[in-house]
Image: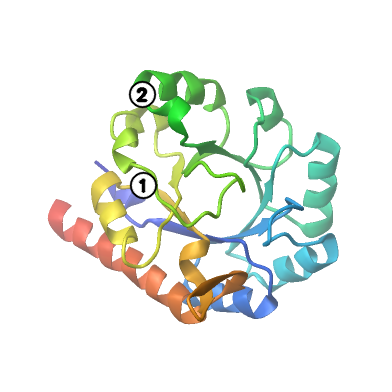
């Protein structure tokens, strides 16, 4: 059960590549934006592009940088040059890789078949608990941004261990995020594919749709209001 202090679900919109999309995300009410520094991702941005995007974020909006199996020197250099407030590690990093990066670390947990049991999940996440937060995402070949959800029920019994320091991701969009909040009460949610532009039925990876972003934020706020009414 969430406490009064955590009744507002925080929202991170990830995979931004255009300044107008940062503006729209901030206008919609995002608490954080995510910039991808994984070269193989269709949402990847370079240093100059990322710095320009970070400058568009309002002072109250966090800017997280997503890295996949990157070296410490690269992460620190990128964070300094871009002005990142958070580091998100989305690869096969070990617990030691999540320390001494000068910024809060969000470690992604890819919910593949190896973590199907509660015991396996606990064994995996426990060494990472010193990280600022854990982000639970669908396992995919592209290290996130697949647009597919995993079974949320797999998190039901470990939330107490996480002490409110976790993020739900994977396949969320305006039509599903409310149910996710009602089911799991996550402190924060992360969306990428679910707010991207669609052209003739094809998702345009890296190009966000301002209407979909506004709809997503509205759905989160509606779910929060429903929880307040139910619990208060």
Q: Nearer the viewer, residue 228 or 158?
A: 158
- Residue at the spot 47% in from the left edge and 57% down from the top edge: 147
* The N terminus, quarter of image: top left
Instruction: Tell me, for residue 117, which label it has, or none.
Output: 2
Q: Based on the displayed image, in which of its 4 quarters is residue 118 positioned? A: top left
Q: Relative to residue 84, is residue 106 depicted above or below?
A: above
Query: Which residue is labeled 1 in the image?
Result: 186
Q: Nearer the viewer, residue 187 or 65?
A: 65
Label 1 secondary element: loop
Q: Is residue 76 left or right of residue 163?
A: right
Residue 232 in view in this figure: no
- Residue at the spot 62% in from the left edge and 48% down from the top edge: 142
Q: Relative to residue 56, is residue 102 depicted above or below?
A: above
Q: Position of residue 65 (x, y in %)?
A: 68, 52
Q: How many C-alpha atoms fall within 10 Å of the one at disc 1: few (<14), some, or many (≥20)?
A: many
Q: Position of residue 168 (x, y in %)?
A: 42, 47
Q: Nearer the viewer, residue 46 or 100?
A: 46
* The C terminus, quarter of image: bottom left
- Residue at the spot 48% in from the left edge and 76% down from the top edge: 201
Q: Relative to residue 94, is residue 226 depicted above or below?
A: below
Q: Relative to residue 55, is residue 189 depicted above or below?
A: above
Q: Is residue 213 left or right of residue 76?
A: left
| Mark 1 and mark 2: Cα distance apart in space | 20 Å
Q: Position of residue 58 (x, y in %)?
A: 62, 70
């Amino acid at each position: 059960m969430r406490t009064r202090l955590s009744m507002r679900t925080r929202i991170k919109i990830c995979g931004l590549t255009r300044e107008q999309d940062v503006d729209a995300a901030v206008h919609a009410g995002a608490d954080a934006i995510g910039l991808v520094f994984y070269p193989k991702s269709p949402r990847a941005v370079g240093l100059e592009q990322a710095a320009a995007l970070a400058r568009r974020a309002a002072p109250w909006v966090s800017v997280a940088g997503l890295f996949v199996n990157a070296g410490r020197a690269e992460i620190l250099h990128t964070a300094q040059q871009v002005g990142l407030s958070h580091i998100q590690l989305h690869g096969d990093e070990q617990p030691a890789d999540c320390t001494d990066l000068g910024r809060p670390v969000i470690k992604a947990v890819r919910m593949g078949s190896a973590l199907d049991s509660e015991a396996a999940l606990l064994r995996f996440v426990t060494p990472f608990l010193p990280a600022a937060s854990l982000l639970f995402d669908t396992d995919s070949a592209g290290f996130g941004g697949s647009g597919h959800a995993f079974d949320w029920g797999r998190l039901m019994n470990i939330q107490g261990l996480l002490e409110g320091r976790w993020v739900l991701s994977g396949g969320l969009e305006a039509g599903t995020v409310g149910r996710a909040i009602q089911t799991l009460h996550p402190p924060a949610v992360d969306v990428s594919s679910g707010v991207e532009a669609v052209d003739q039925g094809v998702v345009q990876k890296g190009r966000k749709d301002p209407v979909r972003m506004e709809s997503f934020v509205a759905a989160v706020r509606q779910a929060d209001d429903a929880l307040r009414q139910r619990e208060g």
